[in-house]
Image (tube, helix red, strand yellow):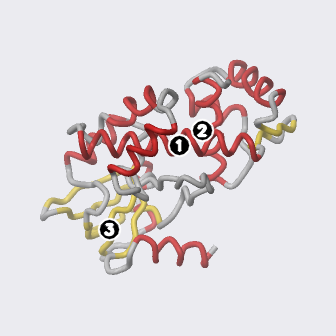
């Protein structure tokens, strides 16, 4: 049986792998989990010994099939819980990530099935992140374009908003920059700021935040935008 900490590492490796398409370095994993590189390295050794990852010195780690299956199940639990908390228990968008982190390791498969049924088998969570289905096939963790890549005059719809920084998420949520919100890009400044109009209010966002917001052009469905992005790649 895996510990919650081991599952956290596998989930983090999965998410980093899907986002970058590359092997995951010890330093990137340590930063994602807020631990020291030696601590991350020690856990990677353990996961390698147990057959959940393959690791090459100086080249990084990648999940084995078994490791990916474990990671996908944890991701599915996490995102279903987030959805249930917002839709049925009145949690705010900014509150659900930490709560789901605590619960994701401890629910049964029967509980998971019942939650999914109550939610009518959702495909995305409240932040717009895709929810793996019960087959635990990998999902597109990128999708769409970043807001930072938009041009002045574009009208876009928010597809996904990163939930990694609660303060930044709260700032965006308070200003209406949440999934399904329609934005008009007013200005893309050379000083690293993107100004958008939301509900007649103009908001300036640093590029580093705009990089965390995934969008598709208004009039395009999120699925079509993701498919087009995949074809372009």
Quadrant for the N terminus in the image: top right
In this rendering, the answer to whether 78 lies above or below 191 is above
207 sits left or right of 95 in the view: right
Local packing at callout 2 (Cα closer than 10 Å; few below 14, some 14-19, many 20+) is many
Which label belongs to residue 75?
1
In this rendering, the answer to whether 78 lies above or below 223 is above
What residue do we see at 54% from left, 73% from top? 229
Q: CA distance from mark 1 to mark 2?
A: 7 Å
Residue 80 location (% of width, % of height): 41, 45
What residue do we see at 46% from left, 66% from top? 149
- Please count the marks in the image: 3
Residue 191 in sight: no
Query: For mark 3, what is the residue?
Result: 157
Local packing at callout 1 (Cα closer than 10 Å; few below 14, some 14-19, many 20+) is many
Local packing at callout 3 (Cα closer than 10 Å; few below 14, some 14-19, many 20+) is many
Tag 3 secondary structure: strand
| Upstream in sequence: badge 2 or badge 3 | 2
Taking the view exactly as shown, the residue that stands out farthest to the right is 57
- For the residue pair 79 and 166, the one nearer the viewer reads as 79
Residue 63 in sight: yes
Query: For mark 2, what is the residue?
Result: 11
Tag 1 secondary structure: helix
């Amino acid at each position: 049986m895996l510990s919650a900490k081991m599952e956290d590492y596998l989930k983090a490796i999965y998410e980093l792998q899907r986002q970058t398409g590359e092997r995951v370095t010890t330093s990137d994993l340590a930063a994602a989990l807020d631990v020291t590189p030696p601590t991350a390295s020690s856990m990677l050794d353990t996961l390698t010994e147990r057959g959940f990852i393959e690791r090459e010195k100086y080249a990084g780690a990648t999940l084995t099939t078994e490791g990916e299956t474990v990671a996908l199940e944890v991701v599915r639990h996490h995102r279903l819980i987030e959805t249930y908390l917002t839709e049925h228990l009145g949690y705010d968008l900014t509150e659900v990530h930490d709560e789901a982190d605590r619960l994701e390791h401890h629910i049964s498969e029967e509980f998971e099935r019942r939650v999914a049924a109550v939610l009518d088998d959702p495909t995305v969570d409240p932040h717009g992140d895709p929810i793996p289905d019960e087959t635990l096939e990998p999902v597109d963790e990128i999708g769409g374009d970043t807001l930072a890549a938009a041009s002045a005059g574009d009208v876009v719809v928010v597809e996904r908003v990163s939930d990694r920084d609660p303060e930044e998420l709260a700032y965006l949520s308070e200003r209406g920059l949440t999934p399904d919100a329609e934005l008009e890009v007013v200005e893309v400044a050379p000083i690293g700021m993107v100004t958008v109009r939301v509900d007649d209010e103009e908001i300036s966002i640093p590029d580093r935040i705009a990089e965390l917001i995934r969008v598709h052009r208004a009039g395009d469905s999120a699925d079509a935008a993701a498919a087009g992005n995949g074809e372009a790649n």
